[in-house]
Every structure is written in C-alpha cells, then in structure tokens.
Amino acid sequence: MGVEFVNKTNLEFMFDMKKVARDVIAESCRQLNVPYDVSVAVTLCDSEEIKRLNNAYRKINSATDVLSFPLIDFDIPGSFDEGALKAQDAFIPDTGEVFLGDIVINAVSVIEQAELYGHSQLREFAFLVAHSMFHLVGFDHMEENEAKDMEDWQSKVLDALNITRD
C-alpha cells in the first residue's frame, strides 16, 4: 500500500501522522474487502490553503476540515470492479496499485475539533482520514441513510484500530 504524506504546515502532532494515516487507510480497505493494493496521497495544510482549494474546486469560499479528491467514479460505493477500474486508468503502471485519490486535511481543524468534541487530536485526525477514505471509494452523506452507512463504516475502522473518543 502506498501513502504519500506531505505536511505543508509548521504544525506537528504528538503522534506519527503518516503511520496513523496509513493504518486508517489500510483498515478501511480491510473492512471493505478491497481486492487490490491501493495508493492514497494525504496532505496536511492550513486553513488558508484548504479555503483556497475549497473555493477552487467546490466554489465554497470558506475553510473546511477535510477535502476528498477521488480519482475513481464508483457506480456502487466500495465496489471494486476491475473492468471499471481499468477503464478509468486507476492502476498505477509501476506498482499495480489502485490510486484512489487525494485527502487534504486542515491541521487547524484537527486541533480545534478535537477540543470542541472533547477527544484527542489523534482521534480527530484518524476520523478525518477515515471520513475522507470513504468519500474516495464512493460513499457520501447527503441523504440520511447514506450518512448512517458512512458513519457505521467510519466507526468500524476506528474501533478496529482502538482509536476512541477518550
């Protein structure tokens, strides 16, 4: 599994961000029974950068906590059809991994939301990676039933990794 991690901030956390991202991505794939090795790019940025990206790609001129840029258009969330993946050029020729896309996390939101929700920065960071991972594989939360499904998947991943709200 490939995880490219870039920290574009001067912020550091009391945990290994790349390892946590890698663990969450791997567990998300395990929970979904993904039949391929995957690759994901994860970038940590500040509020100004994520605001710029949010405006450029979503036409929303405000900062957000996380953005997902999926490479693959899934007909069924989490369903890895080899033919569809090949048609979308999702395989990295050198490694054979499926490139799912990019995750961009606002480091300031990790700090603020951890405090707001009363849990650790580790838990908030892991949650944002899990949340974004499920967006990368086609899940959404626009409808109530979709939101419940996505929340269930996120909880399974964090529970399996013993990353709790405590």
Image (cartoon, helix red, strand yellow):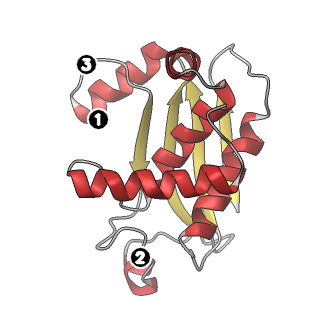
Give the spatial CA distance, label 1 vs label 2.
25 Å
Using a 10 Å C-alpha cutoff, classify the residue at mark 3 as few (fewer than 14 neighbours), some (14 to 19) or many (20 or more): some
Image location (x, y in percent) of residue 143:
20, 51
Rendering quarter of residue 31: bottom right
In the rendered structure, find residue 61 and report the number of the disc placed on it: 3
Question: Residue 150 or 135: which is nearer the viewer?
Answer: 150
Query: Which residue type does callout 2 highlight?
Result: Ser
Q: Amino acid at mark 3?
A: Asn
Residue 127 higher or lower than 100, as above or below? above
* Most foreground residue, 29 or 161: 161
- 1 vs 2, front mark: 2
* Kind of residue at disc 1: Tyr
Position of residue 38 measured from the top left corner of the image (x, y, whole percent): 61, 65
* Contact? badges 1 and 3 (CB < 8 Å): no
Q: Is residue 11 left or right of residue 33?
A: right
Q: Residue furthest bottom?
A: 83
- The CA distance from mark 1 to mark 3 is 10 Å
Q: What residue sits right under mark 1 in the picture?
A: 57
Q: Is residue 14 above or below residue 77?
A: above
Give the x, y percent position of residue 159. Answer: 64, 52
Closer to viewer: mark 1 or mark 3: 3
Dot 1 or dot 2: first in sequence order is: 1
Which mark is in front, 3 or 2? 2
- Say which mark, if any, is on residue 79: 2
